[in-house]
Image (cartoon, helix red, strand yellow):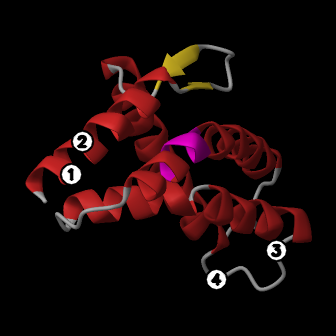
Amino acid sequence: MPLLRAATLLVAIAILSGCAVLTADGERLTLTSPEFRAYVERVFREQNRVADQFAFALEGVRDAPANVTAAEQSLQEACAALNELATARRDERPLSVSQRSTSARSVPTCERTLRASVATLDAWRPPRR
């Protein structure tokens, strides 16, 4: 049984090492590279920062424009797999190879949605309290 697990892990690593994603800037990063890990960390931190900005901007606002609330929702949805990956790592909960791959492949979509959400938030000025 340990041999089967080791073989499965090696096959998964071989598959993932050949896989790559394109960042929003068009940079190709392989999923097992240190650059990809740094990219995931950067996108995760930026997504959290922007989510906080939405929370503070919308706090106490009764009728926020639909495009602003839609941008916040889109950000949450696009980055859900990335947040799941981060939560699993924080909680030291293992994810399957399939879950890790899905999360990793979702990062560029999260990044693109993040950029669009920032533009929407920056274009809207919440009323002063």
* Residue 98 on image: x %, y %: 47, 54
The answer to whether residue 9 is left or right of residue 68 is: left
Tell which of 3 and 119 is nearer to you: 3
- SS class, disc 4: loop
Read off the residue under disc 4.
60
Residue 59: image location, x then y, percent = 60, 77
Disc 3 secondary structure class = loop
**Mark 3 burial class by Cα count in 10 Å: few <14, some 14-19, many 20+:** some
Residue 12 picture location, percent across and down: 37, 40
The reply to whether the C-beta atoms of the residues labelled 4 and 1 are less than 8 Å apart is: no
Q: CA distance from mark 4 to mark 2?
A: 55 Å
What amino acid is at disc 3?
A: Ala
Quarter of the rendering occupied by the C terminus = bottom right
Tell me which numbered mark, 4 or 2, is placed earlier along the sequence: 2
Q: Which residues are magenta?
A: 103-107
The picture quadrant where one finds residue 78 is: bottom right
